[in-house]
Image (tube, helix red, strand yellow):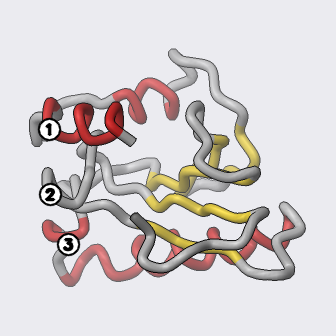
Amino acid sequence: MASETEAALAATPSDGPTVFDKIINKEIPSTVVYEDDKVLAFRDIDPQAPTHILIIPKVRDGLTGLSKAEERHCEILGRLLCTAKLVAKQEGLDDGFRIVINDGRDGGQSVYHIHAHLIGGRQMGWPPF
């Protein structure tokens, strides 16, 4: 958890290219579990549960974080959640799962390209930390 906090504290909000853009463009390898014309879902390189998948829009359109969402982003935000449901089913997460969207420095966001974490395969606790 310390490294996640450090990454969030070191991250700088920017509209410039992110590591996710490199994954979308196949410049960095990833284990893709779902892809369509709007979203990409791939396994997290530092999983926090047996199943930990990141779901991202292929086009950022200024949507660096949830706090930056505008009316025009409603469709893609819904698409991220619907994709999470589809991927959860595909991954066999029939007993439940968690969706997390970190926003901003205090929210633990380390990549300023909105993304949803699909986490499952074990009992989740509350509070999460």
The amino acid at mark 1 is Leu
Label 1, label 2: how many angstroms apart (C-alpha)? 8 Å
> Tag 1: Cα neighbours inside 10 Å, few (<14), some, or many (≥20)?
some
**Which residue bears the numbered disc 3?**
69
The amino acid at mark 2 is Asp
Quarter-wise, where is residue 5 in the image?
top left
Foreground pick, 21 / 65: 65
**Which residue bears the numbered disc 1?**
9
> Tag 2: Cα neighbours inside 10 Å, few (<14), some, or many (≥20)?
few
Question: Helix, strand, or loop for circle 3?
Answer: loop
- Asked if 15 appears above or below 37 in the picture, the reply is above
Residue 41 location, x and y as percent?
62, 50
**Which residue bears the numbered disc 2?**
106
Label 2, label 3: how many angstroms apart (C-alpha)? 18 Å
Contact between labelled residues 2 and 1, with CB atoms less than 8 Å apart: no
Foreground pick, 74 / 121: 121
Residue 27 location, x and y as percent?
51, 16
Task: Give the residue drawn at x 20%, y 72%.
Answer: 69
Quarter-wise, where is residue 95 in the image?
bottom right
Residue 23 location, x and y as percent?
51, 29
Residue 39 location, x and y as percent?
55, 56
Task: Give the residue drawn at x 75%, y 50%.
Answer: 50
Task: Give the residue drawn at x 59%, y 54%.
Answer: 37
Question: Helix, strand, or loop for circle 1?
Answer: helix
Quarter of the picture holding the C terminus: bottom left
> Tag 3: Cα neighbours inside 10 Å, few (<14), some, or many (≥20)?
some
